[in-house]
Amino acid sequence: MQKEQIQILKVSIKRLLRRGANKQLLNIINKTHMADLSIVFQELTLINQQKLFNLLEDPEEIGILFSKLDEATFVEFIKNVNFNKLVEIFDHMPSDDAAELLGLLDEELSDKILSKMKKEESDNVEQIMSYDEDTAGSLMVKDYVALEEDVNAKQVIESLQNKYLDVEMPFYIYVIDAYGKLVGVSSLRQLVVESPDRPLKEFMATDIVSVKPYTDREEVARLVSLYDYLAIPVVDDDNRIVGIVTVDDVIDILHEAATEDMLKMAGVGEEYVETQTIIKGTRIRLPWLFASCLGGVAAFFIIGGFEDTLVQFAGLAAFIPVIMGMGGNIGTQSSTIVVRGIATGRVDVRDFTQVVSKELAVGLILGVVYGLLIGMVAKISFFDQPFSWALAVAVGLAIVSSMSVAALVGSMVPLIFQRLNIDPAVATGPFVTTSIDIVSVYCYFMIARFLLGF
């Protein structure tokens, strides 16, 4: 739904809840996707949430609603749900969603729910929960279509109509041999255009891209994005399929990874501001701001070392902010581009020379453009002073050197940290901005001192 429609939905549901108009509420619920309803649900009071929840009957739909709620809302609301109802809901949820939500609950309640779930469902969920949360195993669903290679197209379609009705995303038919090992895959499109009597082994694709349960989830997302798959199989060390990771989970991974990297680069941790306490937010930001503080102190001592130059040519001070600012901006741009490239797999450490030289060239060109522009401003501003040309050239060259060095540092640092197995998203921001400020000021005053003949 569009934002305007969501707003209308919120107002309508709140008004009907006040009136107790359950029949009209049911009509709205039946026409609304649970993802949209979850947005409204989170803004209701606990009493109204309970009233709305009592109108929901389909456990599968409730499962979708729960999976779309934020952690705090889900954990708080779940305390008021009947235990038997909870078990029924988790029994009907996809195993990956059930594992994720049960992981949010306290261990005692989680174990109690698992013990009452259907044996097959609880086994699947427990297996998923046994993997680290950043791995493919924690994301996979256990519902997939896997048939032996001698089964023909007609029999596959009959199996989909009878045996695999509850499979979440039956877009691919995974083909296994007599030992249960994954040997091929066929899309539904390929299946329906083949002759009904033709066995899977004659038209299946054998160049399979698969992952292990312990593969990092961001690598899974990269592969799905690279090959435009709707799902990717997860296989064990014997190449037996144990689950699949679907594209809806991959979208969530990409969104979370992008958000996480942005928050890390800003030095504010990995959580949204609304989920952080004041103390935690302060504690997370303190060390990163301390790095900037050290850079500012270093810049102060550098400027202090050129005090005699400033006394004689006070106009130099006017251009310090723009020189530091331009360098800092392009350094941030370069580091952001490289960190994002590393995160998406488009930039590799082996591309070091190519990436760095490209960013350096961009920084140099931009430096020349803005150096000329700001140099002209310096000349015009001090046109009646005997040192105006020297000042203009000094400012222009300082801009060129600042932006070039910034682009160089901003592109090099993330790649170096990646090579050292240090998360570039965490370490790049404060290191780049602090170092560029120091270098920019130092270069500016050295150039100015030389050109002004002091």
Image (tube, rainbow, N blue to C red):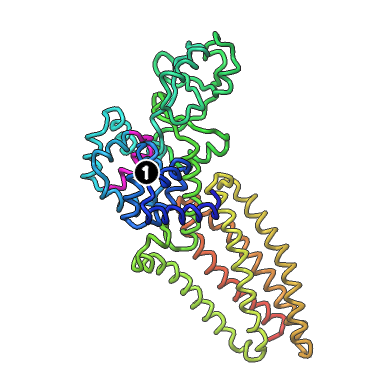
Q: Is residue 109 visible?
A: yes
Could you tell me how many numbered marks the image carries? 1
Percent of width and height locating residue 408: 62, 60
**Camera-side residue of 441 and 41:** 41
Q: Read off the residue under disc 1.
A: 133
Percent of width and height locating residue 107: 23, 45
Q: Residue at x 54, y 46 (%)?
A: 344
**Camera-side residue of 397 and 161:** 161
Q: Residue at x 62, y 64 (%)?
A: 330
Tag 1, which secondary structure?
A: loop
Magenta region includes residue 104: yes
The answer to whether 276 appears left or right of 426 in the picture is: left
User: Bounds of the magenta span?
Assistant: 92-105
Magenta region includes residue 273: no
Q: Residue at x 60, y 60 (%)?
A: 333
Quarter assignment of residue 138: top left
Q: Residue at x 47, y 35 (%)?
A: 246
Identify the image quadrant of the C terminus: bottom right
Quarter assignment of residue 89: top left
Percent of width and height locating residue 119: 26, 28
Above or below, 334 relative to 319? above
Q: What kind of residue is marked 1?
A: Glu
The answer to whether 227 appears left or right of 90 in the picture is: right
Q: Is residue 424 visible?
A: no
Percent of width and height locating residue 261: 49, 55
**Camera-side residue of 163 and 20:** 20
Above or below, 300 relative to 193? below
**10 Å neighbourhood of mark 1: few (<14), some, or many (≥20)?**
some
